[in-house]
Image: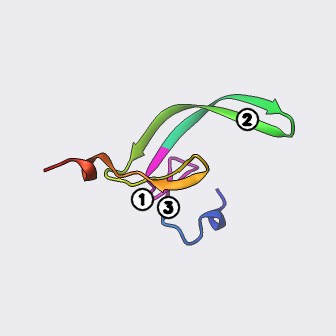
Amino acid sequence: VRASRFEGLDWLLHGDDVPLITGAQASLLCRKDALFHYGSHMIVVGEVIGGQAQPFTSPLLYVDRTFARHLAFEETREA
C-alpha cells in the first residue's frame, strides 16, 4: 500500500494490505473473483466477504445529470 495515496486522510490497514478510510460512509472487503480485459481496461469482479456502513449518513448522489443529497432514514422519521 502506498501511504502517500492516503496522505491527509485518517486511515488504517485491515489485515495485511487493505486500506480503509476511517469514517467513510461505507467500506466493502472483497476477494478477487474474476478478471476481464475490455479494450485497454481490466475489469475486476470481486466477491464481497465483509463490510461496514456508518449509521445516519447523508450520501452524495448523482441522478439525472445533477448532484443531490439523500436524507438518512433516521433523519426523516417522525417522532
Q: Which residues are magenta?
A: 11-27
Q: Residue at x 58, y 33 (%)?
A: 31
Disc 3 to disc 1, C-alpha distance: 9 Å
* Amino acid type, label 3: Trp
Q: Is residue 14 magenta?
A: yes
Q: Is residue 28 above or below residue 7?
A: above
Q: Which quadrant is the N terminus positioned in? A: bottom right
Q: Is residue 41 left or right of residue 4?
A: right
Q: In which image quadrant can residue 52 be found? A: top left
* Amino acid type, label 2: Ile
Q: Residues within 10 Å of mark 2 (few under 14, many from 20)?
A: few
The foreground one among 4 and 60 is 60
On the image, numbered disc 2 is attached to which residue?
Answer: 43
Disc 2 to disc 1, C-alpha distance: 27 Å
Q: Residue at x 86, y 35 (%)?
A: 39
Q: Residue at x 57, y 54 (%)?
A: 66
The foreground one among 31 and 23 is 23
Labels 3 and 1: the sequence-earlier one: 3
Labels 2 and 1: the sequence-earlier one: 1
